[in-house]
Image (tube, rainbow, N blue to C red):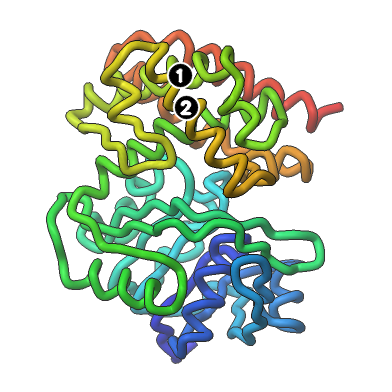
């Protein structure tokens, strides 16, 4: 394929669709890399966004990624599950920059193994959406997509990419401390993911339960042990104020989580973590690529993280058992 898009988006699920649709509507050249039924939906009806925004946007779609030879920016928006196989088909692709908005922190190493660390940006999305069976995407939260250089500091390319996405309508910002923020979100997300899988409740409910609040605090604190061993300082700039959760007593931390639950009940009462969306839809979960990665990293660093290990086995078992019935 001789055309060089400004943005190639790998994965047309909720977040890939939201970002791709806004960039295309703003006049940027966008190519969605999709397959199967989802590719057919995009070719037939374009990207249909509902919720915080209401618009339909025609977009270019490519099902055979081997035909794409270059792109200014590659955005990886697939599920973490199967990323290795998806990226292997793109080894030939020449990119100026690449970043992943997947959950977890394993993603940057995967990208660097293919394109080299110098082309990889860190990114995290505190933004939510849900792809429904009709092909429409519900855009439910537009908080912030953060992008930055993994060695730290500011850069022109991170600023330009973030500005383009922000100007298109998806809140985005370039930041100088992206690795800290990625791990901070990871710490909060792991605890919430565990509770979403085990309770199957909307988010505010388990954030408001006195026993589940304590479980969440303990999970966050064990992830923090792994981060500290890697020399990473955690921040309050995440879905939960992780740094503050680590600073006081367990009771004080639980009260903070309860307050977050009360706010979410008002602002987004139907919010469900993406993992719960996958669970309810019968899709495989990203357990091994997220929680499993944290457990393996702890083992590599010779750290004791019994809660993480136990919940890894529990959630992985739940995932397997429902798919092997």
Give the image quarter of residue 210. top right
Which of the numbered marks, if any, corresponds to residue 273?
Answer: none
Query: Where's residue 51, x and y in %?
Result: 66, 66
Q: Residues within 10 Å of mark 1 (few under 14, many from 20)?
A: many
User: In percent of the image, x 40 and y 47: which residue is there?
Assistant: 107
Question: Image height check: is 16 above or below 149?
Answer: below
Q: Secondary structure at mark 1?
A: helix
Give the image quarter of residue 81. top right
Query: Where's residue 20, x and y in %?
Result: 52, 74
Which of 262 and 234 lies nearest the eye of the viewer? 262
Residue for badge 2:
257
Relative to residue 41, is residue 184 drawn left or right?
Answer: left
User: In percent of the image, x 36 and y 16: which residue is there?
Assistant: 299
Q: Residues within 10 Å of mark 2 (few under 14, many from 20)?
A: many
Whole-Å distance between the Cαs marked 1 and 2?
5 Å
Question: Image height check: is 228 above or below 29?
Answer: above
Which of 276 and 261 lies nearest the eye of the viewer? 261
Q: Residue furthest left?
A: 153
Q: Are marks 1 and 2 in contact (CB under 8 Å)?
A: yes
Q: Secondary structure at mark 2?
A: helix
Give the image quarter of residue 265. top right
């Amino acid at each position: 394929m001789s055309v060089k898009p400004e943005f190639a988006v790998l994965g047309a699920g909720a977040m890939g669709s939201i970002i791709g649709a806004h960039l295309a509507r703003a006049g940027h050249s966008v190519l969605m890399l999709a397959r199967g039924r989802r590719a057919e939906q995009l070719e037939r009806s374009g990207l249909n966004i509902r919720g915080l925004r209401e618009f339909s946007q025609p977009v270019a779609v490519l099902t055979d990624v081997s035909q794409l030879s270059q792109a200014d920016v590659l955005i990886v928006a697939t599920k973490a599950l199967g990323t290795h196989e998806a990226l292997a088909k793109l080894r030939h692709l020449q990119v100026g920059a690449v970043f992943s908005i997947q959950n977890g922190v394993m993603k940057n190493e995967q990208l660097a193994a293919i394109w080299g660390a110098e082309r990889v940006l860190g990114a995290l999305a505190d933004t939510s959406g849900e792809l429904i069976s009709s092909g429409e995407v519900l855009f439910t939260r537009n908080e912030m997509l953060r992008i930055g250089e993994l060695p730290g500091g500011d850069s022109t390319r991170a600023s330009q990419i973030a500005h383009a996405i922000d100007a298109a309508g998806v809140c985005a910002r370039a930041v100088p401390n992206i690795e800290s923020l990625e791990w901070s979100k990871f710490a909060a997300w792991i605890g919430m993911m565990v509770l979403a899988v085990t309770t199957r409740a909307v988010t505010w409910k388990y954030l408001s339960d006195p026993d589940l609040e304590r479980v969440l605090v303990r999970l966050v604190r064990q992830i923090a042990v792994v981060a500290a061993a890697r020399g990473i300082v955690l921040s309050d700039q995440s879905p939960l104020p992780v740094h503050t959760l680590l600073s006081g007593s367990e009771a004080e931390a639980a009260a903070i989580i309860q307050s977050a639950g009360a706010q979410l009940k008002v602002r987004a009462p139907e919010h469900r973590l993406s993992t719960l969306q996958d669970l309810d839809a019968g899709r495989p979960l990203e357990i091994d690529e997220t929680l499993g990665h944290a457990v393996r990293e702890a083992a590599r660093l010779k750290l004791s993280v019994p809660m993480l290990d136990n919940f890894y086995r529990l959630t992985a078992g739940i995932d397997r058992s429902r798919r092997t019935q």
